[in-house]
Image: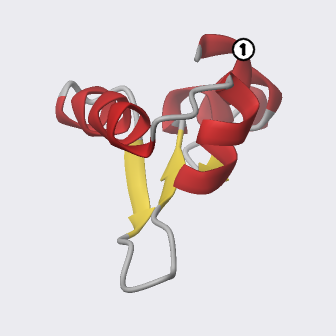
Amino acid sequence: MLDAFFNRPVQNSSDFSRLTGIENRGTANSLLRALTEKGVLRVLREGAGRRPAIYAFADLVNIAEGKEVL
């Protein structure tokens, strides 16, 4: 999971499943929800219908940019 967000700090839930190799969508979504609740990830856009949610590892993006972006 960590490698997936270091390679792509902003990604949708479908990409997260593919990049981590977690085939069970329920498991992947539970992990994303837990990381969001703990403040590790930030939801940039909620999922709706067939459109997946977009998550960001905001702290990493801000450190890389040298300023508060997210």
Point out residue 66 in the picture as x, y percentages from the top left corner. 71, 32
Residue sitting at the far front: 24
Q: Quadrant of residue 20?
A: top right
Q: Which residue is mark 1?
A: 3
Q: Is residue 31 left or right of residue 53?
A: left
Crowding near pointer 1: few (<14 within 10 Å), some, many (20+)? few
Where is residue 60 shown, x and y percent of the image?
A: 62, 26
Q: Nearer the viewer, residue 4 or 22?
A: 22
6, above or below 62, in the image: above
Q: Is residue 34 left or right of residue 46?
A: left
Q: Residue at 53% across / 52% down in the picture?
A: 13
Q: Nearer the viewer, residue 59 or 9?
A: 9
Q: Residue 17: in sight, yes or no?
A: yes
Q: Residue at x 52, y 39 (%)?
A: 58
Q: Residue at x 58, y 17 (%)?
A: 1
Number of numbered discs visible in the structure rendering = 1
Q: Residue furthest left?
A: 37
